[in-house]
Amino acid sequence: MAFIFSQMDKDIVSEQSLESKLALKMKMVKSICPIFARSDFEKTSVFYRGLGFNEVARFEEQGYLILVRDTVEIHFFSTHDHETSQTSDHDAFVQVEDAQALSSEYEKLDMSCEFEKADNKHWGVCELEIIDPDGNLLRMGDVSADS
């Protein structure tokens, strides 16, 4: 995000040696993982398995769970303060190759959650929404040529 660099930062970066620039590039950010509140790890794992995610790590003592689908990771922390009937303050947007196809896949499931089918939004994204049983909002979408 070059637009957040000050002019001084730009001058420093432009004066760096090739070796320094390569070292800086190797330290670039690769991805981000949402961390959702969770009241019950087993229910979470079963629900997200239905969405195509696999459990790759569970740390009961530390209250932490990690699920993965393709290159997307979702992390969960255990909390007993979270009311499962309420919508959470936690949400994430997941970029997908084909939101319509994913939406069709999810429509066939008998999910115990709020689900909004994929739709072309006026901001140029085809997007679907899922609110999981703990109230976490998961938006999944792709840049749509039709929007």
Image (cartoon, rainbow, N blue to C red):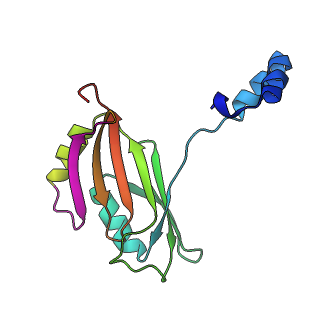
Would you place residue 26 above or below residue 64 in this image? above
Residue drawn at point x = 42 percent, y = 72 percent: 41
User: In the figure, is residue 71 to the left or right of 127?
Assistant: right
The x, y position of residue 27, in whole percent, is 71, 35
Would you place residue 95 above or below residue 23 in this image? below
Residue drawn at point x = 23 percent, y = 58 percent: 115
Which of the 4 image quarters holds residue 14?
top right
Would you place residue 104 above or below residue 91 in this image? above
Quarter that holds the N terminus: top right
* Residue 129 lies in the magenta stretch: no
The x, y position of residue 30, in whole percent, is 59, 38
Residue drawn at point x = 26 percent, y = 30 percent: 147
Residue drawn at point x = 36 percent, y = 70 percent: 87
Residue 94 in view, yes or no: yes
Which of the 4 image quarters holds residue 61?
bottom right
* Residue 121 lies in the magenta stretch: yes
User: In the figure, is residue 9 to the left or right of 44?
Assistant: right
Q: Nearer the viewer, residue 83 or 4?
A: 4
Q: Nearer the viewer, residue 146 or 103?
A: 146
Q: Give the range drawn in magenta.
A: 109-122
Residue 69 in view, yes or no: no
Q: Nearer the viewer, residue 20 or 117?
A: 117
The x, y position of residue 51, in whole percent, is 29, 54
